Image: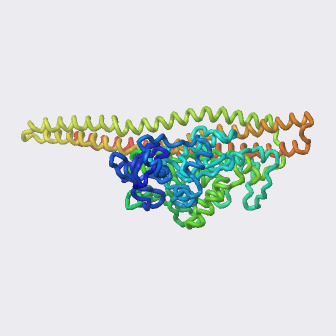
Amino acid sequence: MATQVQALYDFTGEPGTTEMSITCGEVLTLLNTEIGEGWWEGKKSNGETGLFPAAYVRKLTPEESTQTKAAPPAPRYDQAADDWGEQHYSAGDNNYQRGVSQEDGWDDDWEDDTYSEIGPAQQQNKTSQYNQQSSIVIPGMPINDYNQHIDDTSSNYSSSVGTVRKNKFAPSSKISGESYLLATLNVEVPDSEKVYIIQDEDGYIWSPITQPYIVTVASPKKESKFKGIKSFIAYQLTPSFNNIQVSRRYKHFDWLHERLQEKFTLIPIPPLPDKQISGRYDEQLIERRRVQLQEFVDWMCKHPVLSRSEVWQHFLTCTDEKRWKAGKRQAEKDNLLGLNYCVSLVVPEKALLQSQVDHITEQCHTFINSVDTAIKSVSSMCIVQTKRFQGPYKSDCQKIGEAFYSLGNALSLDEGTIVSTSKLTSAIKMTGGVYIDIGRMYDEQPKYDWEPLGDKFHLYKGIAASFPDVLANHKGAVQKKRECERLTAENKMEVAQLNEVLRRTDVISYALLAEINHFKSERTVDIKATMQKFLKQQINFYKKIVDKLETTLRYYDD
């Protein structure tokens, strides 16, 4: 009797490939388990055959197979851990073993790129996840279910805000700042990994980058495996400090982004390109994503802390699979996450005045709320203008051109031998051709001005959306400090311990002040250069139109 499997989750196959969509609870006949890299082949009851992820199904016992017509829906993530352990993932279960064996692979454990390669969000990240506080982590659990599983098992786990994604790897005990504030975290940080905050005429800043570098994102190309069944886009990154090219897929950027967000909670992490599924292999969309990835990389390179972080350097330089796996494990088990990272900071010994810190943070909060609205408005305008340039503006110019050209054709029917009449009809036709050409110019122009402007403000929109979380993390530390002051007043905490809490709260405040000043200095230079480039492109565009019309006008003078 053929082996049957039952779907544990919904899966939507990619159109145009041999992937097959399956529905939770659906029973399929297993045809081939040797496809490789976590894929099996099966057949539905209606005769349809195709590939699906092995981690999305469970094998049925012979007894269960005889009852498939009345088979109940597959248990979901929210069933008791014991049910999962006994029913589906015993030590000898083949599916479980497959999931574990692929945990640390370069491609295996990131087989699905939800945003650029596979499809819907519920298909993301089929590998086993890491969480010390949850009772059990289920291999193959879709990320939406996994996040809910974490929420159910950890009351300290906070949901993402704005563009910030949920942390999928770190246990919530690691991202809590309480262990740092109360000095219960005992970690020695090497001098080479310490980050300094200094004071200059603009206030407190991160110690400047001593050896600046750039990274180019180039040559995006479509690649495939499984003889064309699986397709993806690979981007080539080349750091200027070694000129060694590395190839990264979007899901690798996504993994990096999550690591940065969980580690640096006092620094807003620049956003990745928007999640694009439909038309993801269109050349224009691929290039647009490359440009936005370049914006992300540029911001990382210019940040004094992010540019030297270990996980970022690993991402930029690792070309060996074994080294990649080791670095990946190390990043996912990092103890210095969230406010705990402040152990690495070396700040001025001067105690900060809390009232001044509160004033600055309140100003920042007001500014971020205002600028967030303005940036979203500019981003929307860029999209609207791009559509107008490539739609009605182009169409109107072409209609004008066609009308003039039609007039020239009509007049040419009665030219006779009069030279002036012949020249007039030629000039009118020329006018029509010029307007048609101007329509083409409108269609091409957004990639020189409106799209680059939109890409830049996409970056700032993501940063502005992350800042409220940064301010909230700082506020939480200040509230904890005030709680400790109350406990000391009630003789429930030693004065020496309170002093250490005060000092460590100041370290967190110094970090926030340094980041606020960094953001201010960067945006001042960056937005100025962006607006200058935009206006130059606009001026060049309209000058070309004027030149074309003036040239056409001279035909009438002749």
Would residue 441 be seen by someone viewing this image from the given angle?
yes
How many numbered discs sit on the rendered protein?
A: 0
Compared with 115, 480 (above or below) is above
**Residue 33 placed where, x, y %?**
44, 59
Q: Which quadrant of the view contains residue 524? A: top right
Question: Residue at the location (40% across, 45% down)?
Answer: 278
Q: Is residue 295 left or right of residue 230?
A: right
**Residue 305 placed where, x, y %?**
67, 53
Q: Is residue 15 left or right of residue 213?
A: left
Question: Residue at the location (71% across, 33% down)?
Answer: 362
Question: Residue at the location (39% across, 44% down)?
Answer: 445
Question: Residue at the location (13% across, 41% down)?
Answer: 422
Compared with 372, 65 (above or below) is below
Would residue 231 be seen by someone viewing this image from the given angle?
no
Who is closer to the viewer here, 223 or 460?
Answer: 223
**Residue 364 placed where, x, y %?**
68, 36
Q: Is residue 273 left or right of residue 133?
A: left
Who is closer to the viewer here, 213 or 95?
Answer: 95
Tell me the colour scheme of the image. rainbow
Q: Is residue 131 left or right of residue 455?
A: right
Q: Quadrant of the C terminus?
A: top left
Q: Which quadrant of the view contains residue 92? A: bottom right
**Residue 60 placed where, x, y %?**
47, 50
Compared with 373, 95 (above or below) is below
Q: Quadrant of the N terminus?
A: bottom left
